[in-house]
Amino acid sequence: MSAQKDLPAHLTGGNFLFTETNPALVFTPEELTGDEREMASTAEKFMDKEVFPHLEALEHREEGLAPKLFRQAAQLGLLGLEVPEEYGGLGLGKVAGIGVAEQISRLAGFGITCGAHSGIGTGPITYFGNEAQKKKYLPRLAPGELMAAYCLSEAGSGSDALGMKTKAVLNAAKTHYVLNGAKMWITNAAWADVFVVFAKVDGEHVTAFIVEKTFPGVSTGREELKLGLKTSSTRRVILEDAQVPVENVLGEVGKGAYIAFNILNLGRFTLGAGAMGAAKDLLRTAVKYAGERQQFGRPIASFGLIQHKLGEMAARIYALESALYRTASQMDQVKATGELVYSMKAGHFRAIEEFALECSAVKVAGSEILTFVADEALQIHGGFGFTEEFSPARGTRDARINRIFEGTNEINRLFIPTNLLRRAAKGKLALMAAAMAAFADAQKESAPEKTGDDLAAAQFVLGRAKKAVLLLFGGAHQKFGDKIIHEQEVLAVLSDLVIDIFLGESAVLRALKLRGQSPNAGTHADLALVFVNDSVARMENRARDAIAHMATGDELKMQLGLARKMLRWTPLDTVALRRRIAARLGTVGSYPALIAAK
């Protein structure tokens, strides 16, 4: 195993907060290859021809139907994208997987069935399995011969995953571990053949195990009665003196937490991609309905408040999409270096943990953007939206779980700033030095706001916003020291600012990169500018919340003044911007067509 090397700045997780990124270094979906587009197209055709015609039967859980369609998707190569070719997969990366994830997630229940298998179910074996485990399981998982599931949560340990009670004890012959406990809310539980189960060896050492459903002592509970995701299976997995061969320990004894949390990084990223696909589909439905529904003698799409909704939905999707492809490409580039970061026998690629912050950011943003889009799509449909006759009702129900899946959004909001603090403590990011530099910069005469080029102005204010969040980090550290981890409200503010900066910058860099290259560059600029315009106001309000908790008197006034100075922004006419976006949507009918080059 080679020594770990330093990565270029733009391939270092979290580094976007500390540097200005050249738009040329940011990957955009406009750069997808023909093969990558074809994979997404294959997934789209499969969903339209094979899955949606059976929608009612799937939602009512017709026996055997979902597993049958799962196997069909797998046989098309849609579920083994990241499995190496030597084990029966396609050996592709995160960029190629986004289009597939968003198409399959148009029906959320089916999407989660496939995603839980190919991501958090198969991923642990792909990345952490030894050679024998990979050879045994991956050639059967990649083509869907076997279905996988991931078993971490328990009734008493959801967010506190390490508080698990499931116990593993080595038998006297040292041939098997005996597992006892129950795992809750397990996707694919009724249909899965292979479970990746986390348990504490001797009640202390968190360890991952590959558990087959046919092993003695393995069973499942009843099907959960869920608000949404009706198509999927969710049950308890019960382990009663379950016999697991020692060769089915995944990684090393005591290293299970590291596997669990890094696989969740990947799951969070995929969840963001799936949420984006569902949001795009709901926007298409809303655009179609708004163009057809007549009120007061004209289509409701012609009304300003409906145009506002459509334009805002599209702008948020655009920012999310830009951040997802930016992160996916970064992960693929780091993976391509072959750099390993952990001395586990199987080893794993550094890309798994390098962009943990970005994965949490797109998870939080994606789940909340989908919630917003689903709600607005339902509202556009009016009374019909509240009926099961139209898809926004199902979309609203299905969207809700995403803010809980893969670590609640609250947990992820705490993770983002603490991840930065941990990386700083390890010397990977000069967080406190950057905070001091930001404070010194804020004392100087205010730099003039750029004019005449709205995208450049947006890039400029985002650069200042980075300094504002660094100022808040510095102020919070000075006020609370190591006890900052207990100031959850302040951490949430820092997280919200980081997320808005990451999505906003990703959107602006994409629009800048396309300027002069795409005949539709103006629409890209409109979408990016709507998001940034709104996010600057959000960031200032959130910063005020944190500052008011950290300071009083003259110190409060000084810090509020610095925040206003760093986030100074002349508002744009977003009414006109949203109207333009909505008008184009009404003409072309969908988000993909909205941003297409033609």
Image: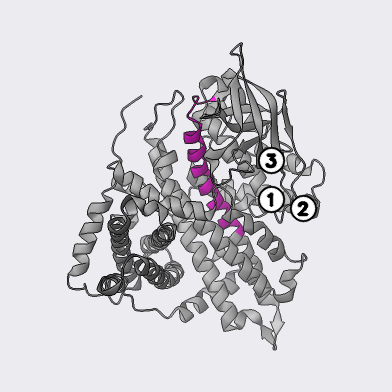
From where the camera sits, is residue 595 visible?
A: no
Residue positioned 34% across, 67% down in the render: 547
Residue segment shown in magenta: 250-278
Q: Is residue 424 left or right of residue 511?
A: left
The disc at residue 59 is: 2
Tell me if mark 2 has few (under 14), some (14-19) or many (20+) residues whose alpha carbon lies within 10 angstroms of its own.
some
- Calculate the distance from the C-alpha at mark 2 to the C-alpha at mark 1: 8 Å
| Magenta span contains residue 407 | no
Mark 3 — residue? 188
Tell me if mark 1 has few (under 14), some (14-19) or many (20+) residues whose alpha carbon lies within 10 angstroms of its own.
many
The percent position of residue 131, horizontal first and vertical second, equals: 52, 21
Quadrant housing residue 17:
bottom left
Amino acid at the residue labelled 2: Glu
Amino acid at the residue labelled 1: Gly
Residue furthest top in the image = 173
- 574 up-or-down from 150: above or below: below
The percent position of residue 100, horizontal first and vertical second, equals: 58, 48
Q: Secondary structure at mark 2?
A: helix
- 554 up-or-down from 295: above or below: above
The percent position of residue 173, horizontal first and vertical second, equals: 61, 11
Residue furthest bottom in the image = 296
Q: Nearer the viewer, residue 148 or 139?
A: 148
For marks 2 and 1 on the same chain, the one whose residue lies earlier in the sequence: 2
Mark 1 — residue? 109
- Calculate the distance from the C-alpha at mark 2 to the C-alpha at mark 3: 15 Å
For marks 2 and 3 on the same chain, the one whose residue lies earlier in the sequence: 2
Tell me if mark 3 has few (under 14), some (14-19) or many (20+) residues whose alpha carbon lies within 10 angstroms of its own.
many
Q: Secondary structure at mark 3?
A: loop
Labels 2, 3: front one: 3
Q: Nearer the viewer, residue 259 or 491?
A: 491
Is the Cβ of the residue at disc 2 closer than 8 Å to that at disc 1?
Answer: yes
For marks 1 and 3 on the same chain, the one whose residue lies earlier in the sequence: 1
